[in-house]
Image (tube, rainbow, N blue to C red):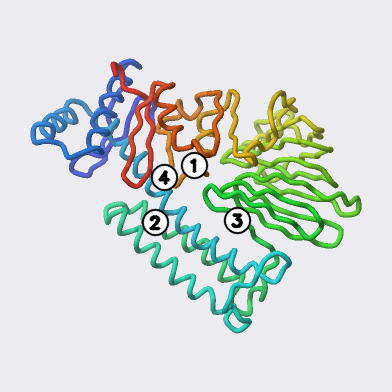
């Protein structure tokens, strides 16, 4: 699509193209601000008859008005879809955690006998089906994309678990221990080798120890590792973009949507890039991506799909300060701060624009203060905050003139 063309659905349901080549940046910013004003007003209350007439006239004034308003609708709907998929996935992962029995430190759920283990996925299917039906009803019959997203997530997670735990074609017992934490929960996990893992809020970790190798995978969130020294059995932490290797040390691994951060408190840590982390088209653009870094105490490195970054010195920074209930940020993307805050509150916060996501801020607060973060941002940044009754929060740039 030409960059000067905007696709928008007309009122009759037919998709047309609106030529906005004549709009200046200031004109488009003005239209976006007007669209935000109308959208937030519609979320707060029902428009009066006069306001409905005025809003309809504004939409008809030029195609870019309708396009700007629909962009905001897509953002809001995306928040509902993401929450629906998250809840369905959480149900399946909770069931997976229940079945992580038979290894030290994980108790077998009561009533789960050998004969009932293979039939357990049936109850999971019923539970997830109820979740899907409830969320599809909540999202509405017109939200076809949302219904497909929820159903697809359910099929994916349930299908894999049925293979893992049911039938003769899959293994009879799980191979991994799975640990997971809820919102605001921080959990200390003693491992069989003497190591101790502190798992951060809303995180998932799997553990698999074999002869000659100790392997864990941080699937989501953050964890602090105090690894017992064993020269004959190296300790590996796998993440989306990199793998950490140690024989005995203290360090933190933090994984968000697009990068992994490793910070060392004590000892030596090797961080190796996953060869499959970058797709071919990304690898071809890289001239000399760093494949491996070695860190010592007081150092940190970040890894992403494009490689491992340069080693940074941690000055005045406490590794994994969240263990003491403190969240600290220096020149950090607002998107990363919000991702952390969302692990400590039920109502998820979403940022409405890319410019907001990339805004850098410096701040610190305790985990008990996460509910005040929204008001703090509203006071310190040019943003408008809209809060839904279910706890969801949408943050948008403040309209011009506000």
Q: How far apart are marks 2 and 1 (CA)?
A: 25 Å
Residue at image position (71%, 58%) is 207
Q: Which of marks 2 and 4 is nearer the N terminus?
A: 2
Looking at the image, residue 93 sits to the left or right of residue 372; the answer is: right
* Marks 4 and 1 close (CB-CB < 8 Å): no
| Residue 311, image x, y percentages | 75, 28
Label 2 crowd (10 A; few <14 / some 14-19 / many >=20): some
Residue at image position (43%, 39%) is 349
Looking at the image, residue 253 sits to the left or right of residue 363; the answer is: right
Residue 347 tag number: 4
Q: Which of marks 2 and 3 is nearer the N terminus?
A: 2
* Marks 1 and 3 close (CB-CB < 8 Å): no
Q: Distance between the residues labelled 4 and 1?
A: 7 Å
Eye-nearest disc, 2 or 1:
1
Question: Which residue is denoted by mark 1 in the rendering?
Answer: 342
| Residue 202, image x, y percentages | 56, 49
Question: Which residue is denoted by mark 2 in the rendering?
Answer: 148
Q: How far apart are marks 3 and 4 (CA)?
A: 19 Å
Name which quarter of the figure residue 379 lies in.
top left
Question: Which residue is denoted by mark 3 in the rendering?
Answer: 180
* Marks 3 and 4 close (CB-CB < 8 Å): no
């Amino acid at each position: 699509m030409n960059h000067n063309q905007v696709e928008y659905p007309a009122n009759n349901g037919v998709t047309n193209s609106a030529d906005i080549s004549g709009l200046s940046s200031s004109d488009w910013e003005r239209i976006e601000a007007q669209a935000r004003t109308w959208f937030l007003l519609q979320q707060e209350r029902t428009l009066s008859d006069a306001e409905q007439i005025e809003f309809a006239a504004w939409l008809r004034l030029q195609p870019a008005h309708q396009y700007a308003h629909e962009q905001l609708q897509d953002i809001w709907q995306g928040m509902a879809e993401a929450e629906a998929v998250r809840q369905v996935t959480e149900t399946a992962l909770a069931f997976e955690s229940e079945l992580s029995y038979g290894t030290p430190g994980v108790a077998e759920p009561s009533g789960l006998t050998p004969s009932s283990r293979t039939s357990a996925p049936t109850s999971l299917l019923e539970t997830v089906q109820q979740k899907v039906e409830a969320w599809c009803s909540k999202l509405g019959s017109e939200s076809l994309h949302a219904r497909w997203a929820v159903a697809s997530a359910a099929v994916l997670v349930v299908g894999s678990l049925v293979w893992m735990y049911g039938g003769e074609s899959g293994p009879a017992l799980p191979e991994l221990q799975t640990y997971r934490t809820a919102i605001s929960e921080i959990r200390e996990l003693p491992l069989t080798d003497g190591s101790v893992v502190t798992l951060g809020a809303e995180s998932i970790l799997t553990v698999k120890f074999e002869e000659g190798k100790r392997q864990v995978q941080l699937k989501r969130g953050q964890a602090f590792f105090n690894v017992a020294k064993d020269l004959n059995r190296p300790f590996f932490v796998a993440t989306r973009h990199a793998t950490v290797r140690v024989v005995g040390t203290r360090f933190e691994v933090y994984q968000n949507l697009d990068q992994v951060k490793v910070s060392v408190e004590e000892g030596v840590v090797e961080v190796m890039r996953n060869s499959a982390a970058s797709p071919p088209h990304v690898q071809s653009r890289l001239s000399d991506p760093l494949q491996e870094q070695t860190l010592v105490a007081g150092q940190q490195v970040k890894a992403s799909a494009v490689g491992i970054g340069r080693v940074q010195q941690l000055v005045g920074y406490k590794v994994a300060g969240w263990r003491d209930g403190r969240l600290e940020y220096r020149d950090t993307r607002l998107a990363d701060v919000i991702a952390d805050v969302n692990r400590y509150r039920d109502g998820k916060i979403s940022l409405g624009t890319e410019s907001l996501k990339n805004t850098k801020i410096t701040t610190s607060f305790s985990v008990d203060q996460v509910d005040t973060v929204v008001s703090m941002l509203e006071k310190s940044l040019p943003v408008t905050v809209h809060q839904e009754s279910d706890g969801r929060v949408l943050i948008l740039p403040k309209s011009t003139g506000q």
